[in-house]
Amino acid sequence: MKVLKLTLNKFNFRLLLCFFASLLLCFSVSLLLCFSRQGRGSLASLRERSGPKAAASPFETVIKPEVASLGDTVSVKIRKLPEEKNPPKIFFEKTKVPVFSLSENWYRTLLPISADYQPGIYPIEIFYKGHGEKIDLTIKDTKYPLQDLTLPKKVSELKASKIEKNLVARALNTYSTEKLWSGKFIFPSSGSLSTAYGVKRRVNGIINPGYFHKGLDFAAASGSSIKAPENGKVVLAGLVSKGFVVNGNCIFIDHGHGVISGYLHLSSVLVKEGDFVKKGQLIGKVGSTGIASGPHLHWGIYVLGRTVEPMVWTKTLIE
Ligand SMILES: [Zn+2]
């Protein structure tokens, strides 16, 4: 009996030891988890909006489209809070992006999802009224075709001049606070579409891995009309005679909120810098100046300096 009692006591003691050890283990694991969560970057107060138990946000956010494709322009709208005078701060890919006042009730930023994005999940971080929020944007893949192009060696070897590079970069980085467009964009040319956006090219048999077509090409007769697809202000009217060797005679229009459209290879430019143009207004004529294999209009749309699919702007009303 005595021996049995002793064994039981020993057993109880071991059991108790086991219990405390597991309690300690549980405690240290939860402590570790807690610290690792806090240490996940500097955005300790940032709340992720995913998951069913997310707490109510003090502000409303509308993202369109919620799942993006390559070439898309993603609109991020934040409802204004009357008691908060400072606008929200928005970061995309850890870079602060400009936020514009869209209307009495909304702030808005546009994010360009260029064709060279790697598909995946990209966080949009919003800070407003002392509150941080992270929304994961999914970018889906798009398979772009490969196009063969033959150009005379003299043309294919042309490089943009310094003045051309600088002036185009300046035009593309215009962020006007006034929004000038109001509807869907119309096609600037009645020519037939010859090259789509995002297409990769093999020029004279050689593929440039970093290259993709940054707009839409319309095959049209030399001298045919080019019309403004929406209201805007001419921020650049470039001429071959002024060093525009790659783009040729060209026009860049600022539509506001970081949206710029470009028209390349023109035979003539009918507007000047500073001009306000109306949707449908004649702005220039189709040509084959700069790097071009024949008469056509290259039409590009840029958001915050990066190219997007112009077709999206003609099919969808981006507010
Ligand atoms: Zn083109």
Image: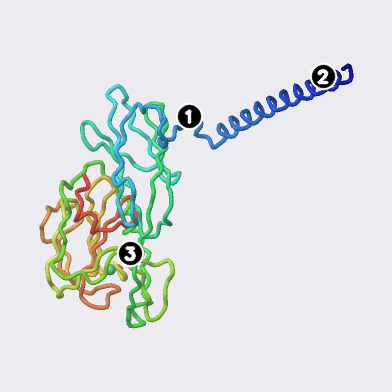
Which of the pair 217/120 is nearer the observer? 120
Q: CA distance from mark 2 to mark 1?
A: 51 Å
Counting residues from the N terminus, which is met first, the one under dot 2 or under dot 3?
2
How are the residues colored? rainbow
Q: CA distance from mark 2 to mark 3?
A: 77 Å
- Quadrant (top left/top right/bottom left/bottom right) for the C terminus: top left
What residue is pinned by disc 3?
198
Kind of residue sitting beneath label 1: Ser
Kind of residue sitting beneath label 2: Asn
Residue lying furthest bottom: 152
Indicate the quadrant of ligand 1 in the picture: bottom left
Q: Residue at x 48, y 29 (%)?
A: 45
Q: Could you say which disc has been placed on residue 9 in the image? A: 2
Kind of residue sitting beneath label 3: Gly
From the image, state whether disc 2 or disc 1 is nearer to you: 2
From the image, state whether disc 2 or disc 3 is nearer to you: 2
Q: Residues within 10 Å of mark 1 (few under 14, many from 20)?
A: few
What residue is pinned by disc 1?
45
